[in-house]
Amino acid sequence: MPNTSLAVKENFTWDDYRSWPDDERWEIIDGEAFAMSPAPNLRHQRIARSLTSKLSDYFDKHPCEVFPAPTDVKLSEYDVVQPDLLVVCDENQMKRTHIEGAPTLIIEILSPSTSIHDRMHKMNLYAASGVKEVWLVTPYPALVEVYLLEGKSYLLIQVFSKDDVLKSPTFKDLKLDLSPVFDFPLDPEENLYVVKEGPSHYTTPSAKD
């Protein structure tokens, strides 16, 4: 199978997926095969490593387990994905080779080449499959969007910046300080312009006015 970033429009299944070479990374959404982008950059990996460490520390005390990529998640015979991180709370879903069914939490670290795919194709799939909570992480400017499944679609609960403490709507006592997660150097051209409030020129009218 050629390693291309374009969708290959055929009705692929889980059995097809399992037969493909181990050194190629693919996902299947509604039977279409999508080649995973090249190896993630160091910034992506630092974020993934930090989140994995923090979440593993938290879930060590809970009946759930954290799995970093690459971990196969079989959502149906025609839908197989490899999220950047996922949390599974039902041990019956943890098969020898993969996760069977919707994880409780999925985290995707976005990049310019995958952002549209993750926001459209994968979010629609996650909602249809019953993934309860999704975090979309933007490395720069540093943001984490937290979504919660409401019916058949996601509700944006809150957007957190690098100076915030993330709170999960599903795991009520899960609180993550995001400043260490986004603690990496910026490139010279990455100047984040912050909107600041200037001095007010408004004066309260006097009583005689």
Image (cartoon, rainbow, N blue to C red):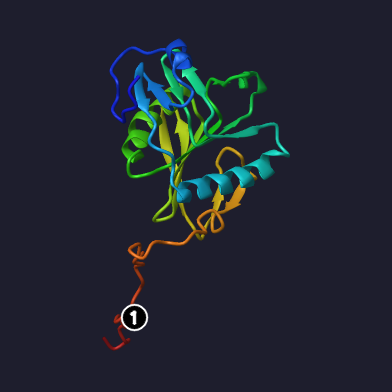
Q: Position of residue 84 (x, y in %)?
A: 49, 37
On screen, 115 above or below 142?
above
Q: Position of residue 4 (x, y in %)?
A: 31, 28
- Image quadrant in which the N terminus is located: top left
Residue 25 in the figure: left or right of residue 201:
right
On screen, 199 above or below 54?
below
Q: Is residue 76 visible?
A: no
- Residue at 61% x, 49% y is 175
Q: Is residue 194 visible?
A: yes
* Total tally of numbered discs in the picture: 1
On screen, 183 above or below 117?
below
Residue 141 in the figure: left or right of residue 130:
left
Give the SS element for disc 1: loop
Which residue is disc 1 drawn over? Answer: 199
Q: Which of the pair 208/59 is nearer the observer?
A: 59
Q: Position of residue 56 (x, y in %)?
A: 65, 41
- Residue at 57% x, 46% y is 49
Q: Position of residue 209 (x, y in %)?
A: 26, 86
Q: Which of the pair 30/40 is nearer the observer?
A: 40
Residue 164 in the figure: left or right of residue 191:
right
Q: Which of the pair 180/194 is nearer the observer?
A: 180
Residue 153 in the figure: left or right of residue 201:
right
- Residue at 36% x, 65% y is 188
Quarter holding residue 153: top left
- For this orientation, the residue located farthest to the right is 61
Q: Amino acid at mark 1?
A: Pro
On screen, 180 above or below 199?
above
